[in-house]
Amino acid sequence: MQISRRLAIFFAPLISAAAALAQPADLVVRNGLVWTGESAQAQAQAFAVRDGKFVRVGSDEDMQDLIGPETVVEDAQGRRVLPGIIDTHVHLMNGSMSFGWLDLRPAVSREDFLRLVREYALTLPEDDWVIGRSWSAESWPDPTPPTPDEIDEAAGGRPAFFIRMDGHSLIAGAEAIRLANVTRDSPADPPGGKIGRSPDGALTGAFYEQAMGIIRSQAPRMSQARVRELFLQAIHHLNKNGVTQVGAIDTKRFVESHIKPVDDAGDLTIRVGVSLTGGGDDLDSWIPILEWADQTRTISDRLTILGFKGYMDGALGSRTAWMNEPFLDDPHDPDNVGFPLAAAENGTLPELIKLAAKMNLQPAVHAIGDRANNTLLNWYQFMGPNRWLIRPRIEHAQHLSPADIPRFVRMSVIPSMQPYHKADDGRYAEERLGPDRIQSSYAFRSLYDSGAYLSFGSDWPVVSSNPFLGMHAAVTAQTLGDASFVPEQSLTIEESLRCYTVNATWALHTPGQTGMIQPDHFADFIVIDRDVLSIDADDIKNVVVLQTWMGGRIVYDAAAEENE
């Protein structure tokens, strides 16, 4: 009797687990080409979901005993099914607000830019500012941006400014410059920023990095109701592109005023891991933000606080990336090597990294130039013995010294990169840096082969959030100008998928929870219109998402929207 009782106690958990597995599933998806992300079982045909998580993955036959009277059965119709895409780097607030601004990405010339501004301005009330985004002059026949007076004429005399594609500079009209009290002689360039002035002192209308705030601070704020409306639009936009999880670069205020309330209402259809911004350039302003992050951490299974976002330098397009050697094509300053932004230059950033490490909060720091990346890796080296647990990130990591590449895996640093930037920067990177220096630019292959957890994202709204455009760039090395840029650093499509799924979970601290179609993982997955693993590489950019599911619940259905 005693032995029987002991056996019963021993086997009770196993029997209970077996009974749970045998319970009907909430959802079964079958007849699919399922890429699981699991190396040992990369391909499957079907899977079952219960309580928002995958419970079984295998063949259609393997799911039969899990189909009950209430089980929803979805036929994938032989389509390719992937884990939900993880975008490790988006700006949710800026992405939301961008839906309320003029999109200048389609402008193909200076004249076309001004035409788009003129047409947009006519749709606005007379007292509205004219604000736009995402322009880039590098592919224009004449790459000279419009002057302040030309902008004012197109904007109908309204104050106007337009943020460049990389988000690191803007051009402003004369009226906006006047309202900001900027003249030939004042103010001086702020720390970490620069006001564009020609050699004779005339204002060019350009404002770089931390000087952008001089203009932006003059524009009226959107109402909270309008921002909420645009935020819901932004979430839907990401789901439409197959994104189910993001690393968000946003402020504590935006988390509290928009992300959390939308989550509380059950309308947050992406998982969000936040790297907090907004602390300014001194350590004292960051301390309450880090303390709040430390006390908050996990808000729900959809919303977590990871740490903070810092900035080392600017961008290649604006020639503000911090380099070891000068840019080769700067017409105004042949000695320009870019510059560190204020918190990096004044010593705040390395102290902030150390303070965050003591709290086990993750630093995610923007670094683009080779000097910026080298300096940041040196600072990360002194984080302490828990660095492997915290997994500090370098955002962008675009231009590296060859000797720094193996340091990522050795130091447990995550290279969080955005492959579609390669398609943009590849149009002019060689002119900026020369043929030798670009060999370790966008070093996807070198970093992946080193064993680093190379993770991919978009930097949306700087560029499109469509991950298949990013995969296309990572695989083909094709630029927006249809040239090839450092193709030796290209990945295969499956490797690129891993960077958007399995690897990305390491950047966002969710391995074992997301990024794979495997039991006990959240049931986040997408169905696409063609088999991305077998099509011609150039066709990757044409992939269309048909359905997006998060936690076993459909959050985007192309067919349903088409019928509305």
Image (cartoon, rainbow, N blue to C red):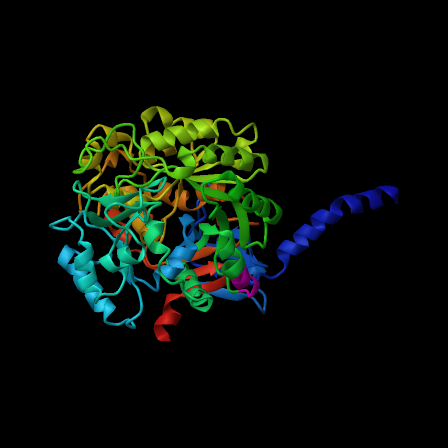
What residue appears at the point 59 percent right and 59 percent down from the top-left corner? 51
> In the rendering, at what x and y percent does residue 76 appear?
41, 61
Q: Main secondary structure of the magenta part?
A: helix
> In the rendering, at what x and y percent does residue 502 appear?
45, 43
Q: Indicate whether 232 appears above or below 15.
A: below
Look at the image and tell me whether residue 19 can be seen: yes
Query: Which of the 4 quarters of the picture holds residue 263?
Result: bottom right
Name the image quarter holding the N terminus: top right
- Out of 367 and 199, give the one closest to the viewer: 199
Magenta segment includes 382: no
- Out of 490 and 272, give the one closest to the viewer: 272
What residue appears at the point 66 percent right and 52 percent down from the top-left corner? 18
Name the image quarter holding the C terminus: bottom left
What residue appears at the point 12 percent right and 49 percent down from the top-left corner? 142
Look at the image and tell me whether residue 546 can be seen: no
What residue appears at the point 47 percent right and 30 percent down from the top-left corner? 380
Residue range (magenta): 260-266
- Residue furthest left in the image: 141
